Amino acid sequence: MSIKTFKQVLKYIEGEENIVIGGGEPTIHPKFWDIIGLCLTNRYYGTNLWMASNGSQKEIMRRLRDMARNGIMSVSVSNDKFHPPLDPDIKKWFTKDKIYDNSDMDLREFHGPRNPIRVGRSKTGIKACCCEGPFINPKGDIHHCGCPKSPKIGNVWEGIGDWDVSFDTCGLKILEEDEDEEDEEVEEYLV
C-alpha cells in the first residue's frame, strides 16, 4: 500500500476505534515506520493499534517489543507451524517476564496453533469466516472481509456503495461464538 493510499485509509476510517495492520508481512514495507507514525499521529495507541508479524525483521522486532511493552501499540508474533521458526532472541523478547507480567500496558503476545488468528486469509484450513469488519487492500479497495472471494464493496476514496452489511457475502459460514466448537474445529485440523 502506498503512503498516499494509507493516508486516505486513515481519513476514511476517522472516528473508528481500532486499526489492524497485517499482511503479508508489514515490517518489510519500505515505509513501515512512516505507517506506524501516521497511526500514532492519528491517535491509534495501545490496543487501538494492533499488528501481526512473522518476526522476520529482527531489529524492527526489537523496537516493536519496546513499543508493545510500554503500551504504545499491540504486537502479536506468529509462533506456529505455518511460519518459519522464530529467532531465539525474538522469542525471548515477546515472552512476558516478571517485571511486566502484571502490567496492563504490556501489549506483547504470540499467536500460534492454540489461538490462531482465524480470518478468511488465514492458512489454518478452517472453512469459516469471523472477520469483524472491512478489509482494505493495498489499492484502497474495501471488501466485506479478508476472504479471497469477498466482493469489493467500495474504496477509500468513494466510500461504500449500496451494500447489505447483514449478509454474509464471502460465501463462508460465520464462525459461532461457542469457543468449544471453534477449538474442536482447530484441533481437528491440527491433528
Image (cartoon, rainbow, N blue to C red):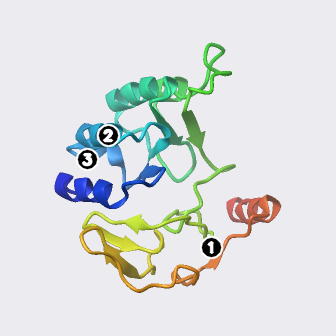
Q: Which class describes the residues within 10 Å of circle 2: few (<14), some (14-19), or many (20+)? A: some
Mark 1, residue position = 128
* Crowdedness near tag 3: few (<14), some (14–19) or many (≥20) residues, C-alpha within 10 Å: some
Based on the displayed image, in which of its 4 quarters is residue 128 positioned?
Answer: bottom right
Q: How many marks?
A: 3
Q: Return the residue found at the far right.
A: 180
C-alpha gap between disc 3 and disc 2 = 11 Å
Mark 2 or 1: the one toward you: 2
Identified by mark 2, the residue type is Ile
Closest to the camera, between mark 3 and mark 2, is 2
User: In the shown orientation, is residue 180 left or right of residue 113?
Assistant: right
Mark 2 — residue? 36
Label 3 sits on what residue type?
Answer: His
* Rendered residue at 56%/64% (across/down): 132
Q: CA distance from mark 1 to mark 3?
A: 29 Å
Q: Secondary structure at mark 3?
A: loop
The image position of residue 34, as x and y in percent, is: 23, 40
Q: Where 106 sits versus 98, above or below?
A: below
Q: Which mark is residue 29?
A: 3
